[in-house]
Amino acid sequence: MKPVIEMEQVSFGYTPGSDLLRGLTFKVEQGAFVGIAGPNGSGKTTLLRLLTGLLHPQSGLIRIDGENVDSYGISAMAQKVSVVCQDPVVPLGFSVAETVLMARVARLGQRVFGDKRDMEVMQQCLQMTDAAHLADRPLGRLSGGERQRVLIARALAQDTPILLLDEPTTFLDLRHQLEVYDLLKAIQGPQDKTIVIITHDLNLAGRYCERVLVLCGGSGPGSSDGDDRAGFFFGRPEEVFTASRIEQVFGVQIVSGRIAGQQVFVPIKRRPEVINRV
Amino acid sequence: MARWWLLALGFAGWVVCGLTVCPPGDAAAVAPGNDGHRAERIVSLAPNLTEILFALGAGDRVVAVTNHCNYPSSARAKARVGTFWQPNLEAIIGARPDLVVALDMAQHGLVAQRLARMGYRCLVLDIDTVAQLMEVIETLGHTLGCPDKADSLRASLAQRLAKACLPVGMACLPSDRAGQTAGPRPRVLWVVQRQPLRVAGQQTFVNEMIELAGGQNAMGATIYQYPPIGAEQVLACRAEVIIEPVAAEDLQGMDRRRAIEFWNLFQGVPAVANQRIYFVDADIVSRLGPRLADGVEAMAGCLRPEGRED
Amino acid sequence: MDGAHLTPRGLLLRAGISLLVLIAVMIGSLRVGSEPVSIRRAIHSMADPNQTDLDYQILVHVRLPRVIVAAVVGAALACAGVVCQVLLRNPLADPYLLGVSSGAGLGAIIAVLSGLTWTLAGGSAIAVCAFAGALGTMGLVWWLGQWVGRWGVAGLVLAGVIVNAFLSAVIMCLVAIAKGDQVHATLFWLMGNINEEGLLVVWLAVGCVGACIVGLFFLSPRLNVICFGDDQARSMGIDANRVRLAAFVLSGLMTAVAVSLAGLVGFVGLVIPHAVRLVWGGDCRQLLPMCAVVGATFLVICDTICRVIVAPAQLPVGIVTALIGGPVFIGLLVVHSRKIGPLS
């Protein structure tokens, strides 16, 4: 299978001298469901920004669909990748339906109004995220969770082969969390979408994702150039999510076990040692 | 992209259309002078022009004036075409004039251009100095067909101006200034506004009138025409006479006590010490018109050693 | 809002009805004035080659251009107001925030002080200099904004405020040394006046403002998207910087034309977008055409009031827009906060 996202020896730091990510290397195949986890400040959102070309790495190569990210223009990138942000700017006056339709604006070309196809896509996406009943409501009158579902619907309406989601379930209740993951899983197969999701929920990630990337953010050993800072782990959840590794990376004491055929990790308490984070 | 080009093209076409249908030439009919036609319906856009027209005996030919034209009293009965600052084009046209006289000011210039474009005859006159006033009287005399009236008006004005400062013991006309003075000219502070304090500088026609009346401006050269000044300059200018123009309607009932109280703060000034503070009718000293001689005479009266207010 | 989103039919309907109202208001305004005029007599005398009939002259040469100019200026300022509020993401923005007002004022006062009397294509020297001043200042503000804030919105606002303050001080300096009538002319211009312009000027103004409004309408879906912030817009495929630049240029051109024709007419650019947004929602595709028509209607009504209330003298139209606009704006804020929530 052709890798649709590739990172080779990517290093990036916001200030010169300190590297948030170092030597990051991994490949994501088309149609994969990848989870990204890591402690706060380990560079997860930064990684998404690097993937869309918003930030440029100090060294290394990033490729989307075989082409270097830098070679994509804004509209070309928007046809390949859609993003659900963690902390979006939300103008309160637009209705939910209008918000989802925004994703179709780049395709309008000469037209000012969308056509029937755009309306259909909008309705489908709202239905998929269980937000169809909110279509008339202005964004200002939605709860945090409802707003998140609307933004996911918008990313779906953009109809791209790659979907990047930055903590899309933060404000969602248990039912809707599962719903989002089920939805993502459902479109992954038939529409052959590649999904990369940043999450704090290791159990859900372990259950749904085929591959996981754990960013250590300077807390523990990982496959990098012999330096134990800015390390990372990439692979199948069974291999990457081990109790000792999680304890080391996240700095907590874990109790783990198999429940309903799946490995589950439950944090008990914080580890006494101070984690050195640079 | 295509629609942007279409838009630009459409706009260019629009502009070309406009330029061909109405080419940007100006129908300039602003030349002064007599084109043989005697003006029977005159509209005046300035108070001093109105006064000149009436002084030339063309008062009955004037059909409309501005709100500010209040002299002579028969002018007040004429139809109004707006204010001096903003004449109303509709009202001017409504008066069906065959001659419109205006001053060389920004707003009047615009109005004159528009009227000229519509085919009306406009006369734009520049009256900033006494010499220009004399020229304008001559021009209007020609235009109205009464050159002899104009000449006599000019002569009488010149005569009165020449005599105005004699009681003060001065030679008055600016051209006579060289070496004919018979004593120091009184220093005059011309106060346009009391709070904040604004006075007339040297590049004003008021200055010319002061010199015609036999005085000299207490202020030195200034950048501003009507500079606001502070207490320091008031004391430094050593004015011997302070003159405040006051609007005619306020002149009767004004509170002189207040004014005197204000000036008593500046005890170091000779004018205040000698109580030589005078109030004159603003209309005759702020308009460059036929009543110029009245104004100068009033000022000369203030400058006389024994001091007489008019 | 019909349903949840805007349809072309809905927009056409609303815009069409508003346009009819505008035309009715303009015709009504033609019939009102300090002189009694009969439209029928004017139409009869159109056949007359001499065309010296008073009614015709007043209607066609004085009132008609003035009403058209009022409509054009109103439309231009309202649309520019929409754009500025969207670009700067600030509901209190108006078209004069970005330096146009002081730049145009400086151009105007320089023209007045130099006593220029030439005309260019029928436009007076003051109008042309104000236009040049407005465009020049906007270029300066844009350049400064890039330099200070690197494409950001904050840089633009900062640059606009600084340039406005600086040039206003320069204007005040010049006013202090000007002669009485020049001062009056300048202040009058600063208060905003609708004048009777020549046919060519009106034609060009209509064309320019119309083209800019159409251009902004083309841009309006993208303007909607940049309300979500640069990052989200980028991820949806819209280059926020390019859209901002295009919108800035178009609205700046419109504002320069409006200001050169009528001076600084206030409140139209601030109040009309809010009023329209309150009634019909904030979708730019609807906001722009509706603001154009409503703004035009508003200013024609204000100008008519100015012409008749103290006839034959006239009030500066900027005074009437402020007197009406101020209370209306406060009323809108109250209704807005009750309906949607605090202004944000």
Image (cartoon, coloured by chain):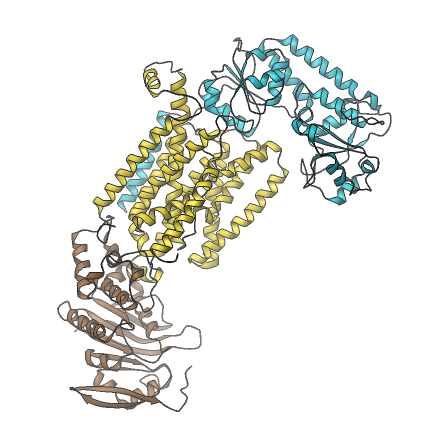
Chain colours: A brown, B cyan, C yellow
Query: Residue B219 is drawn in which quadrant?
Result: top right
Across and down, in percent, residue B18 comes to 35, 29
Left or right of C5 on screen, residue B274: right
Q: Nearer the viewer, residue C150 or C179?
A: C179
Residue at the right extreme, as displayed: B183
Left or right of B183 on screen, residue B111: left
Residue at the left extreme, as displayed: A190
Q: Quadrant of the C terminus of chain A?
A: bottom left
Q: Quadrant of the N terminus of chain A?
A: bottom left
Residue drawn at x 23%, y 82% is: A203
Visible residue check, residue A157: no
Visible residue check, residue A176: yes
Above/below status of C105 relative to C67: below
Residue drawn at x 41%, y 17% is: C54
Across and down, in percent, residue A142 comes to 28, 63
Residue at the front extreme, as displayed: B253
Across and down, in percent, residue A263 comes to 20, 87
Above/below status of B211 relative to A147: above
Residue drawn at x 56%, y 17% is: B77
Across and down, in percent, residue A43 comes to 35, 76
Q: How many marks?
A: 0
Residue drawn at x 34%, y 35% is: B12
Query: Residue B261 is drawn in which quadrant?
Result: top right
